[in-house]
Image (cartoon, rainbow, N blue to C red):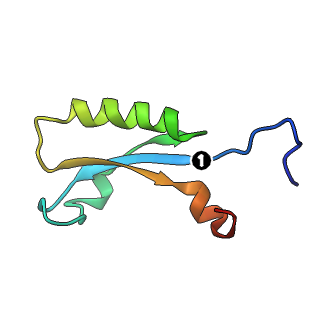
Amino acid sequence: MSPQPDQQKQLLHLVFGGELENLEGISFKDLEDLDMVGIYPNYASAYAVWKNKAQGSVDNANMRYFIVHMHRLLDPENE
């Protein structure tokens, strides 16, 4: 089902984070301990949540939060 002309296309974004094994890579210390923050309808709302979570974990240098552009994974040919 395609969106109606007056409906804005959903551009889903996932925000998650976890403690990295080291600062040189993106390998998580414990996959079962990932913080799955949520899925958001656009980048702006995902960014606001990401920024809040990142600032809240500033005391742990190995803690990182990420924004995943889920819409690109769901529909890679429409970028």
Residue 22 falls left or right of residue 71: left
Front in this rendered view, residue 6 or 46:
6
Residue indicated by mark 1: 12
**Is the residue 26 above or below the residue 34 in the image?**
below
Q: Residue at x 23, y 30 (%)?
A: 56
What is the quadrant of residue 35 in the picture?
top left
**Is the residue 60 above or below the residue 48 in the image?**
below
What is the quadrant of residue 75 in the picture?
bottom right
Secondary structure at badge 1 equals loop
What is the quadrant of residue 58 in the picture?
top left
Q: Position of residue 74 (x, y in %)?
A: 64, 63
**Is the residue 77 above or below the residue 31 in the image?**
below
Q: Residues within 10 Å of mark 1 (few under 14, many from 20)?
A: some
Q: Position of residue 72 (x, y in %)?
A: 58, 61
Q: Position of residue 15 (x, y in %)?
A: 43, 45
Front in this rendered view, residue 53 or 2:
2
Q: Quadrant of the N terminus?
A: bottom right
Q: Position of residue 59 (x, y in %)?
A: 10, 35
Q: Residue at x 31, y 57 (%)?
A: 32
Residue 77 falls left or right of residue 35: right
Total of numbered circles in the picture?
A: 1
Q: Quadrant of the C terminus?
A: bottom right
Amino acid type, residue under disc 1 in the picture:
Leu
Q: Residue at x 32, y 51 (%)?
A: 34
Q: Residue at x 25, y 64 (%)?
A: 26
